[in-house]
Each structure stands twice: as structure tokens, then as C-alpha cells.
Amino acid sequence: MASPGPEAEDVVAAGEPQLEGRHRLGGVLVQQRGQGTHVVALERVDVAVEQRALLDRYVDAFQRYDMSALTALLHEDATQSMPPFELWLSGRDDILGFWTGTGHECRNSRLIPTVANGRPAFGQYKPSGPGGSYEPWALQVLEVCGGRIVEFTFFLDTQTLFPLFGLPATPPS
């Protein structure tokens, strides 16, 4: 007999992998037993055509690090956080100021799409490895509302998260 699908209470945040049983983690159904974690299935979440167009523009603008294009995509009250750091940015100007200041090392990053907790997400790879090779940097989870990006959360535990989301150790060439 097939086991029933996960229930709403099985939804967990990325920071709670210690729970036992079956859980949803960003579109990935995770089966946990003791210390072992196994990916059971990967679900695809359909994205509305207009949201897909916005996300395509975001990927293009972020990979080119085009601040003018990114400005057009962000809601004026957008927020950004980066666990485990206490970083909390509020407003388009603060976010873009961070990206052109301290965050400038994200320039020339590559993004690979995925889904996290029903939201659009991207594996981000920075060109910070030996000889400029790309290394995992963050799982970017976005919230979109009203045709604009209203929230970014950059989860930095890529060693744990990238395998759970089916993201490769290096982006394809």
C-alpha cells in the first residue's frame, strides 16, 4: 500500500532538518530516519506566465549585475535577509546599496532555478573558486507579489541545501 502524501503540518523551514518523518523542504519531499536524510521525490511547481517572465528578467539582470534592470524588478519596500547573519535590508535602495557595496562579490554569479517552500528559488554560484571557477554561495528564495520581487532570503548553508534541492556542486558550462 502506498504511503499517504505529506500533510500541511509536514511543511518545514530550511533551518529545521532535524525533524523525523516525511517533510516538504522547498518542493523536495524528504524522508528522514535518525541521522540519514533521503530525497524521495522532486515536485515541479507551475509558475504563472507573468511570474515566469519576471523571474527570467531577474536571472538575466542578476547574472549581468545590472542594477538598473534589477531596480525595475524590486518593490520599493522589498526586504532581504541572509541567515545565519543578522543582515536585514529594507527597501530597494538599501538592497541595491548592499549589492553594489559589500555584496559586489556577487557580480558575475550564475543562477540555477529551483523551488523552495512553493516559492521561486535559485542556486547561486559565485566566481570565487580557484582560477575564477564557480562555487556554491547561496540558495536564494524569492517572494513575488504584484509583479515585483518583495522579499529575498539568501540561505548560505549550500553544503546541506544544494543536494536537497537537486542543485549541482558546480553550474553547467
Image: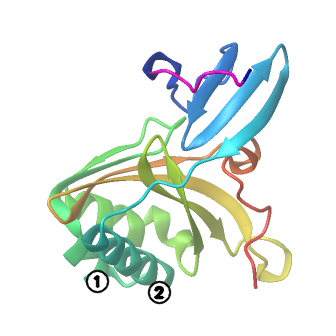
Task: Pick whichever, 46 or 79, lies toward us.
Answer: 46
Task: Classify mark 1: helix, strand or loop.
Answer: helix
Q: Is residue 147 above or below residue 23?
A: below
State the residue in front, 9 or 158: 9
What is the magenta range? 2-7
Q: Tag 2: residue type?
A: Arg
Number of numbered discs: 2
- Image side of residue 168 versus residue 102, left or right: right
Q: Percent position (x, y) of residue 95?
A: 31, 60
Query: What's the CA distance linking mark 1 and mark 2?
Result: 9 Å
Using the rendered view, name the quadrant where residue 120 is placed.
Answer: bottom left
In the visual, does 50 lie left or right of 10?
left
Is-magenta flag for residue 13? no
Residue at figure coordinates x 65%, y 67% from the top left:
125
Q: Which mark is residue 64?
A: 2
Quadrant position of the C terminus in the picture: bottom right
Q: Earlier in the sequence, mark 1 or mark 2?
A: 2
Question: The residue tagged with tag 2: helix, strand or loop?
Answer: helix
Q: Nearer the viewer, residue 163 or 152?
A: 163
**In contact (CB < 8 Å): disc 1 and disc 2:** yes
Measured from the top left, where is residue 74 in percent x and y? 23, 66
Colouring of the image = rainbow
Graded by Cα atoms within 10 Å as few (under 14), some (14 to 19) or many (20 or more), the crowding at tag 2 reads some
Q: Residue at x 74, y 37 (%)?
A: 40
Q: Quadrant of the N terminus?
A: top right
The residue under label 1 is 69
